[in-house]
Amino acid sequence: MVTHCPLCGYDFNDGDMACHTSCVFHNHCSIVCCPNCGYQLPDENRSHLADLFKRLTGRKEEQPEPRSQLRPLSALLPGQSARIVKVSAATAHRQERLSVFGVIPGAKITLQQRKPAYVLRVGFTELSIEYEIADSILVDLAV
Amino acid sequence: MPVKAHETAASCHATPAPLRTNDAPIVLVGNPNVGKSVIFGRLTGRYVTVSNYPGTTVEITQGSMPDGTPVIDTPGINSLYSASDDERVTHDLLVTLRDKVGAVVQVADGKNLQRALLLTQQLVDLEIPLVLVINMIDEAQIAGIEIDFDALARKLGIEVVPVTAIRGEGIKHLTEALTRARVAHHVTVYDPYLEDSIARVMDLLPANVGGGRGIALQLLSGNQHLAQTYQLNGELTTINTETSKIYGRPLKTVFTGLQMANAAALMNDIVRIPEERRHSLAYRLSAWATHPLWGWPVLLAVLYVVFKFVGEFGAVTLVGFFEETMFGEWINPFATQIVEAVIPFAIVRDLLVGEYGMITMALSYGLGLIFPIVTTFFIAFSVLEDSGYLPRLAVMLNRAFKSMGLNGKAVLPMILGLGCDTMATMSTRIMETRKERIMVTLLLALGVPCSAQLGVLLGMVTALSPLGVFIWAAVIVGVMLAVGWLAQRILPGQRSDFILELPPIRLPHVSNIIIKTLARVEWYLKEVVPLFILSTLILFILDRIGALVVIEDLMSPLVVGLLGLPAAAAGAFLIGFLRRDYGATMLFGMALGGQLDAGQVLVSMVVITLFVPCIANVLMIFKEFGWRVATGVIFTVFPIAFAAGALVNALLGLFRFAL
């Protein structure tokens, strides 16, 4: 990402910064120094507080929707429904165990929550699975 | 119940041929948590523990109908092609002992018909006379589901009976339908490739094998046991590899996938499921119970209520009445008077009312101290079980268990262990791999106190400051985490996926709670109290022949030297080998008698908590896993118990905490 120094007008990349390598905060430091003039300016993308403020005031733009409606189940948001496209055959045993609950290609699922474990609904079955399994299921949002 | 026309006609109907013989058993089969046990109770008049979480029935239960036909209740099963340990029993009964089964009654949940129809198709392939019972019709109706039972019956060619078993509705129809149990139509459409392979495997089987199609599907799914029975190896393997090459994955996943899709197709014009779903209170409660944030206050609230009920009402109020008033003031003085007046022999008098007396020690501990605690715990546990909260707890704790190489499912046996470790050891069958089962068994034996012991420990902690209680809890949890962490690395095998069905949140039925609690209390009185009497007898004899002193001397380097306890505590540990709660009770008695200071109470609590629960538990481990695991558990647990005690004692000496 290119940063523009408000003091001297120098444009620099993250890699050009000299201060982070010698700083105890390293990459977590939310202050950046212009490698040209040494001016210290706050990096609002790295600051957790700034990020929180932006989220609270709604100034942060949500990440744009991926154009494809296909994604792993693990990327669904709670409340979203989707149709299952594929259950990864990484382990046949897992595929078989999920299928007896109705988690098979073509089935419509609704994600209820992601944490502390994924909970989804298939028909009238409420099923809890962990992240690794949710990640191995491919769903299509265009129901 | 409305009387229908064909009910009266059933007695004089003319059956073309005997469809099933009367002495061959009827087997109840179905997905977990669909109400098989309730129907079993309705058919036989016998009660089996009914709960709202999977894995309740881990062994088959037998009973018989009024006309003498045997009925078998089986653990829930989702598919006949893969079987975890708890499903193995059902699987073997249907597949291996197929010819001995008279008829199968498949119980389905009206809300989950698709999953039930998967199993139906697998049963149809085995060609056993079948009746399909669709249970929980009331809940399905509330959810707006409409099922055309007649159309389903026509398609399958068997009787389909709607019931609401918990209220007894439709059971009469079921008993009649049983007389008309018959082999269903084959409804599953497999690919031509699969049909070809099935036919080829069927050709390999002896001609007189019944249900050959189902057996062939089993063999193609990789049932090793059957392959050995029919001595098929070379050719079967060839067919198997050839066919699975077409699909690029093991055939059992191909079968279940096809059957599941087929089930959906079957339901197409028969079942109507509303698109919109009301968000009921139960639904919202369920969401709170597993919420990443609100789940914890819910958990704390549940724990608090249980503690209030078991720890305060049971362990303080009721114990106060039973032990101090009933035994301390009425029974014991009265019995002592009678015995002293009637029995002239000193030894018999001592045996009954002496220091290690049957009445003054065994019964007043077993009935006065522990009985009220276990009863209140069983009530609390039954309510939790029936409410459907426990699997949600598993969701909350999955991550913690993951760090020990287990998955959240382990919560269920662990919580059950707080009631009784022996019962819990059996229910470890819901874990999928042997490694996980052994790990849970080990952790249960090591650190999960059963209700009896928990009650005594709750009594003992009153001698400690909050800091002392915290140290005790931290040591126990720490030891369990450490042992789990190590066992995960040492034991061979692997962790299984966390896939857990969450049953609906339900308001428990009062009658069900009462019956369940009574069944468990009866078990306690039958199994535990006699063990108390036996242990007391052993202590009495050891005391009489002077062996108790010798043992105390022998154990004194350990008990006095390492643990810093009085030599008399050796007796408690000795009895702790038989039942650790009884050992804890003796230590509690010593603490009450002022023989232990706060530090000694803490050390003795740590040691006795980490003991092997009881002799029955060891026998159960032996039964489930064989002698190697049983001795392994014993030789792991006892050294850890004493080592942890010695460590706490040493640290206390070093830092001199004010406890």
Image (spheres, coloured by chain):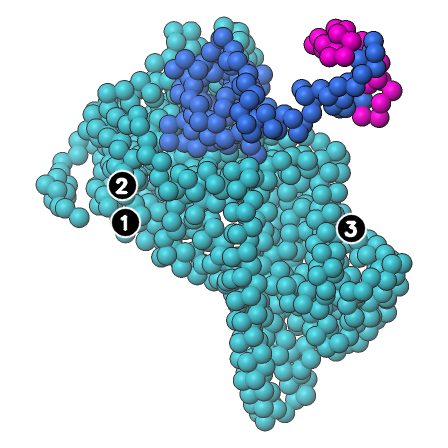
Chain colours: A blue, B cyan
User: How far, Cα to Cα, is label 3 from label 1?
Assistant: 50 Å
Residue labelled with disc 3: B640
Pick the front one: B189 or B65: B189
Q: Label 2 is found on which chain of the structure? A: B
**Quadrant of the rendered image containing residue B5:** top left
- Secondary structure type for disc 2: helix
Marks 2/1: CA distance?
A: 10 Å
Please name the residue shown 58% across and 59% down the image: B451
Instruction: Tell me if B228 is positioned left or right of B102 in this view.
Output: right
Q: Residue drawn at (77%, 65%), measured in percent from left and top?
A: B659
As for residue A20 lying within the magenta part, the answer is: yes
User: Is disc 1 on the same chain as disc 3?
Assistant: yes
Q: Look at the image and give the residue range highlighted in magenta.
A: A1-25
**Percent position of residue B409, x then y:** 56, 38
Using the image as rendered, state which of residue B563 and residue B156 is in the foreground: B563
Q: What secondary structure is found at the residue carrying circle 1?
A: helix
Q: Do the residues bearing badges 2 and 1 touch, measured as CB atoms within 8 Å? A: yes
Q: Which residue does the numbered mark 2 point to in the structure image?
A: B138
x and y percentages locating residue B249 in the rendered image: 53, 12
